[in-house]
Structures are given as structure tokens and as C-alpha cells.
Image (tube, rainbow, N blue to C red):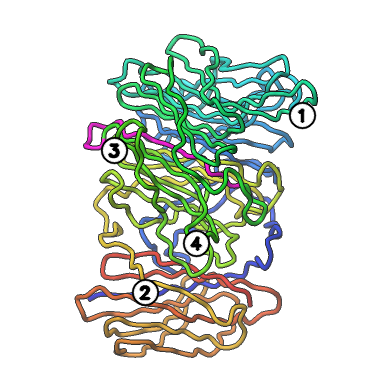
Amino acid sequence: MHYIILILLLATTSFASVTPLKEHQKPHSVWKHRPLEHRGFSIPFDEHVNQRVNTDDSGQIQNEEQVCINPLDPDNMVAVWRDFREGYRRIGVGYTVDGGESWSDVLFPQMYYEWQSDPVLVVDHNGVFTANVITFEAGGEGDVGMLSVSSYDGGQTWQDSVWAVRTTDESAFEDKQMLAIDNSPDSPYQGTQYMAWARFFRDPDNGQYDSTHIEMVYKRPDSAYTAPIQLSTRRSVQWANVATGPNGEVYVTWASYALSSAMFSRSLDGGVTWTDEVDLFETDFQSAEVNPSLLVFSYMVMAVDNSSGPHRGRIYALFTNISNDNNDTDVYYTFSDNMGTNWSAPVVIDDENRAYDVDQFHPWITVDEEGRVWCAWYDRRNDPNNILMDVYFTVSENGGATWRPNERITEVSCNPGQGTLDAGLIGEYIGWYAAHDKAVCVWTDTRMGDQDIFTAVIDSLFEPNDADPVIPNPTSFTLASYPNPFNGTTTLSYTLTTPAEVTLEVYNTIGQSVLQKSFGQMSTGEHTYVARPIPTQRRLFRQTLSQQSTRRGEVDVDEVAHEILHSGTACCCINICLHTGQTPLTMGSLFGRA
């Protein structure tokens, strides 16, 4: 027997405007996960437990994450992030040795200068983690440098501070670096670190840092970093990204403000010489704001298939750009099979098809040792007001020819404008890394009233599991609400493409069934049911449809309206899950005020 289940969850959280939400009650040193089945609804795919990494209660911002998995011990993961818990720029570091079940976190010591910012992280084939941070004098004036430090014990202690670049004459400010390491056993440059960044040159006449170039340094094992190599010939550039190939190839991309394009250069001799910069794709913006004053960027992030599989050497890339209808932002995917000379036409990788505008941004990409391509990004598909965000991901096992349906990582949608506002709200990138049949994501989350570092491990996708999807998402699914905001009775309108038995179930917030109503066998076509109010602040509606047909069923929910019987402003969060047999698919969510 086949079943289709519609799940509609109402919660009482106000979000009527783009201003920050009211803070949650403190203390909030621990985020306590509640399994989804105990929250009154079944899980759409595998459940990814969300864990809070930082342990402070400062209320300050934490963002710009990077994370890596130890290749010698997949239970050991390390994350770094920008941390303001002491009121100014520091670097937080967290590590786990039990596969993400628990995390420990500390601040990096103040090395050379008072402020640190913009951490990046790599791990080599021997399990040595290396972080690079910008460190500079308080206020951003004076000396500045980019310092690398390494951990030989899984992130617990850090040593071997090495300058990648240091400027002490105030002629430039070094910023927005990215780091990669060559871990390929077939590369003559295995173990080499490559770092690209934007150098802001200071005008001696006005003292302003008003011109930029992309610079590169590299470091062979047991050697110092080289002198900087300038990659860009045009100025007004930023957002460098670097990746390495299986035979020692090195690739760098960056954004050109002057050309409104993604730029590219490569080296085939371990970073010694570089090709002239080339213009890959025109983008509609390089940096922009979406609500609520959230900075987003069109930089291109890359990962290379270094496996022994059929797509070995392929460069994969993601970037954010304006959507085809020019109303919001989407994440685009492209690849190259000839070391960046030619690229596939960019295509949208997110599969949401909401009727309202949805911004997706801050993508990241990683390729595991089996050649599987993993992509993650921030996504607002669950909020018609296009404010609340989640993190979604997808995976391809065949070189990007097909992708798993987008899957939600976050258990709670959050407002990026909540809490202390500073530094572009949520930074400029997230942490995402895959190895040993799993991936780990680290992101900025405001569910507890201010910015925190949250993480989740995706570790059951490639094990035999009833939750693994075997059919693609239906493309005809649409969701709308009227009236919205709403008041009065509850109206549910749905369309069946095959006959089905329909049952309406009402749940309270702890998952207890408080009402069941059977409509019996319903025919193909549109049906509407008007429900009388139920006096409770939070209600969960589950529409269950059992299908006798062996055909896959689809449901279009055209109108949903709900009443919440209490004073004040409330929000309804309606989570829709479509289940057909053993294949549950997350279809979407809806929010509205009552």
C-alpha cells in the first residue's frame, strides 16, 4: 500500500518584519536536540542532528566557518570560525573525536597582534590540520599579516606559527584569503600549501585602501612560504578561491568588479608560473545585499575530483547569481574537464520551485575520495517572506549528471538579522567537507537569539537505508496560502492525481494525536475541507492518503489557512512531506501570520 502524508506544523514565533527577532531566554549554553519523531512528524530523509559548537553565552557574533575531516581518523573533525565573544575579532576552534557526538571549543591565542579574523583550514594526508588567519593591530591600522598554525593532535593544540605574508609598512592590507593543500599521492608537489588572497593597496595621497590585486604564495613541506606572486593584471578584484588537481595542477578563481565576471588562472608546475587571467562567466553582481542587509557574493568556489574514478581531474564549481527571473538569487553549478580551458553552461543546482521569491547564497563544494560531489548552501525556501534561512545540500555520484533531491540540514529556520549585527551579518562562507562516506557542515545559526556555530554530520547516505530516495522530486508540487495573514476556520484544498483514502489527523506539540477524521476513498481531482477551530496555540495537521494504485501519487496543495486562537502575533510554519511507499520527499514549508 502506498501512502501520501502532508504535514503542517504551526509555531508561535513572530517574524512580521525584517528587524531582529526578540532574543530567546538565556542561559543557552546547550542546544538540546529533539528527534523529529518526538516533535510530531516523521523524518523526510535521514535526520541530521544539529549540535551547537561554541560554548559561550556572550551574545556576540560567530561566523565564517571552515571544517575538515581527518583522513586517518574520520571521527576526528576540526572547525574554525570568526569569533567576537570577547567583543572584538578572535578565532574560535572546535574539535570532535567521536564523530560529532560532542565538541570542544577554545579561542586561538593572540599571536603577534591583538585582532585575528577570516580563518581558513586544510588538513594534509598525514592528518595535520593547518589554519591560516589574518592578524592585525586593533582598529585595522598598522601592521597586518596572514599567519598559519598547525595541529598534530586533531585540533586540541596548535603550534608552528608561520607567516604566509606580512606587511609592516602600511603600504597594503591583506584580506580575503583562501587556502588549499595538495594531498594527491600522484602529484610531484604533494603536501604543498597554496594561498590566494586580495591585496588592498594604499593610496599614499589619501591614505585609502582603494585598489586590489589577487596575490598567491605557496609553501612546500619543510619550507617557508614563497614571496607573493601577482595573478591578476586588472585591479578591482576580490574573493579568491584555490583548488588542486590529481597531478599537481593548481587552480585559482576570483571575482572582477571591473568586468563583472568570474576570473581564472592555473599553474601546472606547482605554483611557479601561472597562465594569464581569463574571463569565465559574466555575473550580475560581485557583492550585493538581500534582506535584512545581508551581504552576498558571486565568488566561485571549486573542488577537484582527485579520485581514481571516471571523472578524475574534473573541476567542479559553484557560484551565486541572480535567478533567471531576476527576482532573487540562485546557486549555479558548472564543471571543466580540460583544466579550466572550457566550462559547461552554468545550471541552477537547487531544486526548489516555490511560487514566491527564494534567495540561495554562500555555497560551498567538496569532492570526496570516491569522486562524489557534495554541495551545500544557505536557502530560504521555507519562508515566503524570504528572510528565514536554512542550510540545504545535495550530492552527485555520477560527475554531476544527476543529483539527489535537495535535503535540509538545519532542524530550525533562523533569521540572519537576529542578535548583534556586524561584519556583513553572517560572514562570507560556510564550512563543508566530505570524506569517508560522510560530510560535515558548520554554519552560522541564530535559533538561540544570537549568532552561534552549529554543526551536523551527514553519515548515513551511502549505507542501506529505507530513508534513501529512489525517485526524483515531483516537479508539479505547488504551495500557497489564502488568506495570509489569516483568521477564522481552517481550509485545506488538495488535488489527487489518483484515487486515495484520505485521513486528517491533528497533533499537539508533543506528538500526541488529538483528532482523527476519515474522509474515506476520494476520487481523482480537487477536494476542499473546512475545519472548525481547535483551541490550542500550536497544532500539527497530518493529511494521510493511502493509495491502492501502484502508480506514484502526487498532491498539489493550493490553499491552506489556519487560525491560532490566542492574543498577539503568531507565525504558522507549515512543513509539507510527501510520502509514496518507502520514498519520503520533503516538499516544502509555508509561513504566515495570525
Q: Which residue is mark 2?
A: 5
Magenta range: 296-311
Q: Which residue is mark 1?
A: 139
**Quadrant occupied by the C terminus:** bottom right
Of callouts 2 and 3, which one flags the residue occurring earlier in the amino acid sequence? 2
- Measured as percent of width and height from the top left, residue 15 is found at 65, 65
Q: CA distance from mark 4 to mark 2?
A: 32 Å
Q: Which mark is on residue 371?
A: 3
- Amino acid at the residue labelled 3: Gly
Q: Is residue 447 visible?
A: yes
Residue located 58% across and 39% down the image: 64
Q: Residue furthest top?
A: 223
- For the residue pair 256 and 136, the one nearer the viewer reads as 256
Q: Secondary structure at mark 3?
A: loop
**Quadrant occupied by the N terminus:** bottom left
* Residue 543 position by quadrant: bottom left
Q: Is residue 428 left or right of residue 476?
A: right
Q: Which residue is mark 4?
A: 325
Of callouts 1 and 3, which one flags the residue occurring earlier in the amino acid sequence? 1
Q: Secondary structure at mark 2?
A: strand
Badge 3 vs badge 4, beta-carbon distance below 8 Å:
no
Of callouts 2 and 1, which one flags the residue occurring earlier in the amino acid sequence? 2
> Which mark is in front, 3 or 4?
4
- Measured as percent of width and height from the top left, residue 163 is found at 58, 15
Residue located 53% across and 76% down the image: 539
Q: Is residue 298 magenta?
A: yes
Q: Is residue 491 left or right of residue 451?
A: left
